[in-house]
Image (spheres, rainbow, N blue to C red):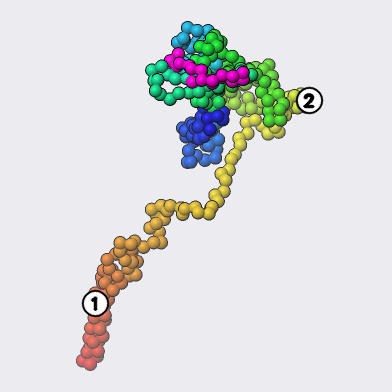
């Protein structure tokens, strides 16, 4: 599948990398609210890393290996990550030899071999004269859209080009990719009002500064809430005509009102394992398998039963004594009467 563009990734590499990233933030033990908070935290961390990479691409210069114009050209066009990939391919291209195998009016076929491995695996380059495009059997450009070392060797040795043609540069890997027009699913251009974003950032900064100062005082917090509620009521009439600009009206509820979330009901699915019982639940209403249950004392895990229960045996002598004492008293009474 190397002839299909996949940004240089395998079939499952993108999903596995996403799973590995989010495992640092979420787990199966999180509740629904915790999952939402941790997921948003992970996305913010991802965006922060992207801003760091953009800053490096704009302000830092990469290290050069080859003193040629093509490397300087691509350092200004490619992002840092893909420039170093191109640099490795360009550096290795000087270790290859080219041999023309066949040529006609439309195409030209060349064999590319490495100098230090003459008996090694050879690559074949097909150059289409009508399209002015060279393709290699390694399919690196088709899968990752980065020129391979074999094509680069053909360009700067046969054609003696000092700059890479535009048909070998993918805009996806350039620094200016984010500054171009962005289209939605329906083909409409997505525009962003930078002045509106700057105004929103300024207002949000002032709002956060006031909250940080009044949060430590109960009186100041109460006054701030009352002021904000009255301010929202005054602003509502001014926002009546701003819905057409994409600004949503304020909600009827106060901005300080807390939202409550309910956990979803537990649903027993087919094939689900039984719930693991705790220690108290296991001992409750269940006899111990290592012993028997005595119906005399009512205890589990005993080595006796009702017939030889020590509790019942302790009661038997006292009962016999009472019977004997009551019998002797009766006889004495009878004897005394006889006397």
Q: Does 330 appear in magenta?
A: no
Q: Is residue 177 visible?
A: no
Question: Residue at the location (39% across, 57% down)?
Answer: 282
Identify the disc placed on residue 304: none
- Dot 1 lies on which element? helix
> In screen coordinates, is 15 left or right of 243?
left
> Mark 1, residues whose alpha carbon is within 10 Å: few (<14), some, or many (≥20)?
few
The residue to which callout 1 is attached is 321
Q: Pick out the residue farthest to the bottom.
A: 338
Q: Residue at x 57, y 48 (%)?
A: 265
Name the foreground residue: 107 vs 257.
107
C-alpha distance separating marks 2 and 1: 103 Å
Determine which residue is flagged by label 2.
241
Looking at the image, residue 328 sits to the left or right of residue 294; the answer is left
Mark 2 lies on a secondary structure that is: loop
Q: Is residue 90 visible?
A: yes
Q: Nearer the viewer, mark 2 or mark 1?
A: 2
Above-or-below relation of 6 to 94:
below
Residue drawn at (62%, 20%) of the image: 106
| Dot placed on the residue nearer the N-terminal end, 2 or 1 | 2
Q: Position of residue 277 (x, y in %)?
A: 42, 53
x and y percentages locating residue 45 in the rendered image: 52, 26
Is residue 100 in the magenta section? yes
Which residue appears at 61% of the width and 18% of the height? 105
For the image shown, how many numbered marks are present on the structure? 2
Question: Which stretch appears magenta?
Answer: 94-111
The picture places residue 48, in percent across and down from the top left corner, at 53, 22
- Figure quadrant of the C terminus: bottom left
Relative to 178, residue 338 above or below: below
Q: Residues within 10 Å of mark 2 (few under 14, many from 20)?
A: few
Q: Nearer the viewer, residue 270 or 26?
A: 270
Q: In which quarter of the view is residue 192 placed?
A: top right
């Amino acid at each position: 599948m190397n002839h299909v563009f996949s940004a240089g990734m395998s079939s499952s590499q993108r999903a596995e990398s996403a799973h590995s990233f989010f495992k640092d933030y979420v787990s199966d033990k999180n509740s629904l609210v915790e999952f939402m908070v941790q997921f948003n935290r992970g996305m913010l961390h991802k965006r922060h890393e992207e801003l760091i990479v953009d800053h490096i691409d704009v302000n830092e210069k990469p290290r050069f290996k080859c003193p040629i114009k093509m490397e300087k050209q691509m350092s200004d066009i490619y992002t840092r990550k893909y420039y170093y990939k191109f640099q490795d391919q360009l550096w290795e291209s000087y270790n290859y030899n080219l041999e023309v195998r066949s040529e006609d009016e439309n195409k030209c076929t060349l064999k590319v071999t490495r100098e230090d491995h003459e008996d090694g695996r050879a690559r074949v380059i097909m150059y289409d004269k009508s399209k002015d495009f060279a393709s290699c059997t390694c399919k690196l450009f088709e899968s990752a859209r980065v020129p391979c070392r074999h094509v680069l060797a053909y360009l700067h040795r046969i054609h003696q080009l000092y700059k890479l043609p535009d048909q070998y540069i993918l805009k996806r890997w350039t620094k200016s990719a984010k500054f171009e027009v962005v289209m939605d699913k329906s083909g409409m251009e997505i525009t962003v009002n930078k002045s509106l974003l700057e105004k929103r950032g300024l207002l949000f900064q002032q709002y956060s500064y006031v909250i940080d100062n009044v949060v430590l005082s109960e009186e100041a917090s109460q006054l701030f809430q009352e002021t904000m509620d009255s301010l929202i009521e005054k602003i509502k009439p001014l926002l009546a005509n701003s819905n057409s600009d994409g600004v949503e009206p304020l909600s009827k509820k106060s901005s300080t009102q807390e939202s409550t979330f309910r956990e979803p009901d537990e649903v027993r699915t087919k094939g689900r394992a039984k719930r693991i019982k705790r220690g108290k639940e296991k001992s409750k209403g269940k006899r111990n398998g290592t012993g028997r249950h005595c119906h005399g004392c009512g205890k589990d895990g005993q080595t006796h039963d009702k017939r030889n229960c020590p509790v019942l045996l302790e009661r038997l002598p006292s009962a016999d004594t009472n019977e004997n004492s009551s019998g002797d008293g009766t006889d004495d009474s009878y004897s005394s009467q006889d006397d």
